[in-house]
């Protein structure tokens, strides 16, 4: 069931957060250091272990994991964006200029990289898988 996928991610998040808080305490910080990263490593390791063992995850369990993974990126981006905007506004003009330059530079490079990909013929092959 989907709830098992949510439970697996929840358990990995609790364990990862605990490890992150331990690491933060060991470094003398009063915060979680890398808890979400540890949780992600745990879920990947668990899925790889189950695949290697041959049992794998049920399709509905994978559906629960995919549901949360679809929510994860927008939530984290929104949280970090809020912190970054506050920091940039309170620190002065330089962080704002750096952010604008990085954003505009990235947008300008999209057509260039797309053209390079077409010229090299890599659109027919993605991650080693041939589309033919």
Image (spheres, rainbow, N blue to C red):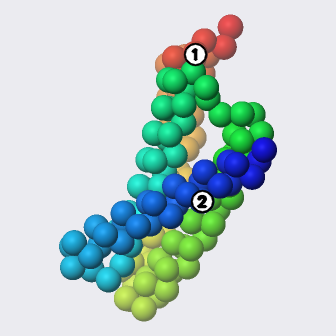
Question: Which class describes the residues within 10 Å of circle 2: few (<14), some (14-19), or many (20+)?
Answer: some
| Left or right for 115, reference 88 | right
Question: Which one is in front, 124 or 112?
Answer: 124
Residue 50 in sight here: yes
- Return the mark for residue 36: none
Quadrant of the frame with the C terminus: top right
Quadrant of the frame with the N terminus: top right
Decide: is 55 above or below 99: above
Q: Which residue is mark 2?
A: 10
* SS for callout 1: strand
| Left or right for 107, reference 17 | right
- Return the mark for residue 129: 1
Q: Position of residue 67 (x, y in %)?
A: 73, 51
Q: How many marks?
A: 2
Question: Which class describes the residues within 10 Å of circle 1: few (<14), some (14-19), or many (20+)?
Answer: few
Sooner in the amino-acid sequence: mark 2 or mark 1: 2
| Left or right for 60, reference 18 | right
The residue under the point 36% across, 63% down is 19
- State which quadrant residue 61 falls in: top right
Furthest toward the left, the residue is 27
Q: Position of residue 124 (x, y in %)?
A: 61, 16
């Amino acid at each position: 069931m989907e709830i098992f996928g949510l439970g697996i991610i929840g358990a990995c998040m609790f364990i990862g957060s605990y490890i992150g808080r331990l690491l933060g305490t060991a470094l003398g910080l009063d915060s979680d250091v890398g808890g979400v990263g540890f949780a992600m490593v745990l879920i990947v390791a668990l899925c790889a272990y189950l695949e290697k063992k041959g049992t794998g995850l049920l399709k509905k369990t994978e559906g629960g994991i995919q549901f949360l993974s679809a929510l994860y990126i927008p939530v984290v981006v929104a949280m970090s964006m809020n912190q970054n905007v506050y920091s940039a506004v309170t620190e002065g003009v330089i962080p704002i200029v750096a952010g604008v330059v990085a954003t505009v530079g990235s947008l300008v490079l999209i057509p260039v990289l797309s053209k390079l990909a077409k010229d090299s013929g890599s659109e027919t092959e993605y991650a080693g898988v041939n589309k033919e």
